Every structure is written in structure tokens, then in C-alpha cells.
Amino acid sequence: MPVKLTPPPQSSDAREGGPDKRRWLGQLCQARVLQRRFRQHPDDYLAALEDRLVKLSLPHSFFRYPGCYPQQP
């Protein structure tokens, strides 16, 4: 999933910033990891993304009772 990055929190000292700055750095790191995964294995990355999207769009009961729904070829 795309990660929305906000500008880093402003502080007078680069070593300060507390949890807001750590959260921002964590988001930045997560975005870089996803970019690297896409560059190295784009087919696998897109297949995983598609699987997540399908799971979000199907009803929860679909996964609880797999034999109740017709199988697609």
C-alpha cells in the first residue's frame, strides 16, 4: 500500500523530536522497503497487493466457509 508521508516534525535540534520524529522516520523506512520490494520482484509484489485487495473486497464469511461459494476456473 502506498504510504503517505508528511513533512518531518520541526525541532531546533536534529537529535530532538521525540515520538513524532520516530514515527515519521518509521514511515519513511516502510516506504523505502516497499519501493525496494517492488523494484526487485515486481510480479510478486503486485500479486500480493492484488491478493490483499481481493480479501478486502470479499465478505468475511467467504473465508470462513470456503465450500459454500462456487470455485472460479
Image (cartoon, rainbow, N blue to C red):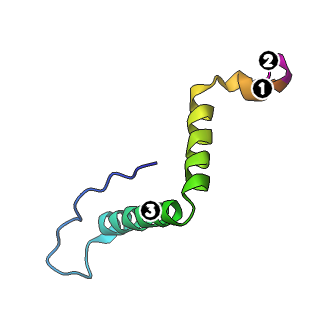
Residue occupying image coordinates x 55% and y 48%: 46
Specify the amino acid type for callout 3. Answer: Gln
**Front residue of 13 and 58:** 58
Specify the amino acid type for callout 2. Answer: Pro
Q: Which residue is mark 2?
A: 70
Above or below, comparing residue 45 to residue 11 in the picture: above
Spatial separation of the CA atoms under disc 2 and disc 1: 10 Å
Q: Which residue is mark 3?
A: 35
Question: Which residue reaches farthest right?
Answer: 67
Residue occupying image coordinates x 62% and y 40%: 51
Q: Position of residue 32 (x, y in %)?
A: 42, 66
Check disc 1: other Cα within 10 Å, few if <14, some if 14-19, many if 20+.
few
Q: Nearer the viewer, mark 3 or mark 1?
A: 1
Label drawn at residue 45: none
The magenta segment is 67-73
Whether pointer 2 and pointer 1 mark residues with C-beta atoms closer than 8 Å, the reply is no
Name the N-terminal-most of marks 3 and 1: 3
Kind of element beneath mark 1 = loop
Q: Which residue is mark 1?
A: 73
